[in-house]
Amino acid sequence: MTAPVIHIERLHKNYETAAGSVPVLKGIDLSINAGEFVAIMGPSGSGKSTFMNILGCLDEPTTGRYLLNGSDVRSLNGDALARLRNQVIGFVFQGFNLLPRADLASNVALPLLYCNEKKHARLMRAHAMLDRVGLGQHASAHPNEISGGQQQRVAIARALINHPKLILADEPTGNLDTKTGDEIMSLFKQLNQEDGITIVLVTHEPDIALYAHRLVKFVDGLITYDGAVMAAHT
Amino acid sequence: MNIQMLVEAWLAMGANKLRTFLTMLGMMIGVGAVVLMLAIGQGAQYVVDQSIASMGSNLFIILSGSTTSGGMRMGSGASPSLTVADADALAELPDIAAVAPASPDSAQVVYGASNWSTRIYGTTSAYLEVRDWHLSAGTPFTDSDVRAATRVALLGQTVVDNLFGDENPVNKTIRIKQSPYLVVGVLAAKGQSLDGRDQDDTILVPITTAQRKLFGNQFQGAVRFIMAQARSADVMDAAERSMNELLRQRHHIPPGGDDDFSIRNLTALANTAADATRAMSAMLGAIASISLLVGGIGIMNIMLVSVTERTREIGIRIAIGARQKDILLQFLLEAIIISIAGCTVGVVLGIAGAIIINQMADTAVVITGSSVIMAFMVASAVGIFFGFYPARKAARLKPIDALRYQ
Ligand SMILES: Nc1ncnc2c1ncn2[C@@H]1O[C@H](COP(=O)(O)OP(=O)(O)OP(=O)(O)O)[C@@H](O)[C@H]1O
Ligand SMILES: [Mg+2]
């Protein structure tokens, strides 16, 4: 077995607020290997999003170690972190986070703008990726012209465009109905099985968690369960 | 850099056209004002340079009467103390190239049915040399004309225009104070003098003719002023000293006594005038630059609003791999595009304004390539300078804060 994609030791995160320092993550240890499909569940406010943001290098831990792809994130400078976000990680948000002014192809191509891909190649790859998520015919539509499920597919296409090793998805189906959510999850499952992409996904819905192989439960900033996904545990 | 970034900047600006236009407006007005003010300043400078060039070089004017007399300022030329003989003596000095005495007076001139009132200078043919003045037609009067006090005249272009229209005046006869004078030549047009007078509104006649026949003279041989030209710019001071010495000696002024004449270095006076004009045009430019500065602050203001409004977009871009410098460049590009676009329109407005002023008022307005280039460079610099702070603010946003921003 190669080194884990994600390796976390004694990770703490405090938010500094007017009322003082609020501990949100209180000592997380977690390793995720390449090719795993992990679901994170837990009550609202237990620190799942906080944790995902740290995994995605969008936020920094207060203390503790985080090795991504073998390198200590704390030792990396801004440009190196940007490179990780660009090439290694694909982030999928609950709220899609597409650029409203850009058409779908440009939205999908956006990460390529930051790795010096030529314009022609950018658009070719964006169209290919839109085809893959079943939206090839909408390439020149704008985000407000398509449904939520379709928007999430665009966001996934954008996350995939640079062939990431790791996809981080924070409640990707939270804004979608069950049927659309299942379609999105099938797509994730396919990416995990066929492309070997490691997936970490936060959800509140037991049905969604069933797509994963491993379940991690957060309660009040600590992991209370880490093991197989079984109906009983969800 | 990436073409796509330019396109994105352009789209972002297109998303709020009115705001982009208003931001540009500040820049347009600033640049337009700078271009226009520089044009006006340079126009004024052009006029001054032109009159200096038309004055003749290394020039002195020696006036009768002292500038101060026993502490009292007297009008120059008050008592006629200079004579034609003084002029002849000055011409012998080694540093002096040419000397011309002159006695001006006004008179009515008639040709056929036309008449014109002008200034008539009694002088010698050396006057043309001293003033560096050429003829556009005919020949100058000669030394023998001066000796014989013949009734001949050289006409300035304005006089020709008013008396003759399109007719060739050479060898025609005009009447000055009822007496006939033969026109032997026409002086080439010189334009305005430094004090704004039309130098072409003049007639030159032999000084002897003026003194004996035209105006008469209570003091035989006295002249109002003498113009002298030094051999070169380097000997101006020496020439002034030797002329002063010679005239004091000729006028029997004891040591310590006041001069009964005054020598003025016209070239130095002209340079002072040129300096004053330069200072004025620099000041016009500086005042106009303030509006450019205000335009720049407008850009900064709007860019700050834009960064705040687009915080979420910035967060998304960072989340998918934009580096700080990518974000910086994106906002900087917007500021630069706004300032350069505003500047381009501003230059056009400035030039249009200059052309309108040129046609409405009769002042010279000069637009030089360098002033346009300067306005452009300053505008881009202003764009970069005032765009930098908001752009850096955008680039330094923490990804998670930017993404959470509502
Ligand atoms: N920027 C912040 N400043 C202060 N406190 C914060 C901040 N972000 C989150 N918190 C607090 O940290 C705790 C964990 O928040 P987090 O968003 O990680 O929860 P979550 O598990 O994702 O919840 P949900 O399931 O509702 O999405 C919450 O109590 C929240 O109030
Ligand atoms: Mg959450």
Image (tube, rainbow, N blue to C red):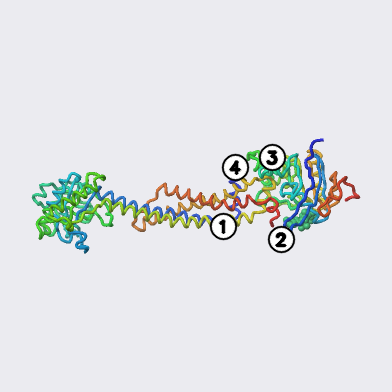
Identify the residue at horizontal 30%, vertical 51% (top origin).
B271
Q: Amino acid at mark 2?
A: Ala
Within 10 Å of disc 3 (Cα), the crowding (few <14, some 14-19, many 20+) is: some
Where disc 1 sits, the SS reads helix
Q: x, y (%) of residue B131?
A: 22, 49
Residue type, mark 4 in image: Asn
The residue mark sitting in front, 3 or 2, is: 2
Letter of the chain that mark 2 sits on in the rendering: A
Along the line of sight, the residue nearer the viewer: A32 or A8: A8
Between label 4 and label 2, give the one nearer the viewer: 2
Who's the residue at 74% across and 55% down the image?
A15
User: Which quarter of the figure is the N terminus of chain B placed in?
Assistant: top right
Q: To which chain does the residue with label 4 belong?
A: B
Q: Are marks 1 and 4 on the same chain?
A: yes
Q: Are marks 3 and 4 on the same chain?
A: no
Q: Nearer the viewer, mark 1 or mark 4?
A: 1
Q: CA distance from mark 1 to mark 3?
A: 38 Å
Q: Residues within 10 Å of mark 4 (few under 14, many from 20)?
A: few
Which residue occupies the extreme right position in the image? Answer: A232
Mark 3 vs mark 4: give the one in front. 4
Instruction: State the separation of the CA atoms marked 3 and 2.
Output: 46 Å
Residue indicated by mark 3: A125
Of residues A73 and A116, the one drawn nearer to the viewer in this rendering: A73
In the picture of the structure, the residue carrying the numbered disc 1 is: B301
Instruction: Give the mark nearest the N terminus, 3 or 2.
Output: 2
Mark yes or no: residue B116 visible. no
Q: CA distance from mark 2 to mark 1?
A: 29 Å
Callout 3 amino acid? Arg
* Image location (x, y in percent) of residue B275: 34, 53
Q: Kindly identify which residue carries mark 2.
A: A18
* Residue beneath disc 4: B2
Is B67 above or below relative to A183?
below
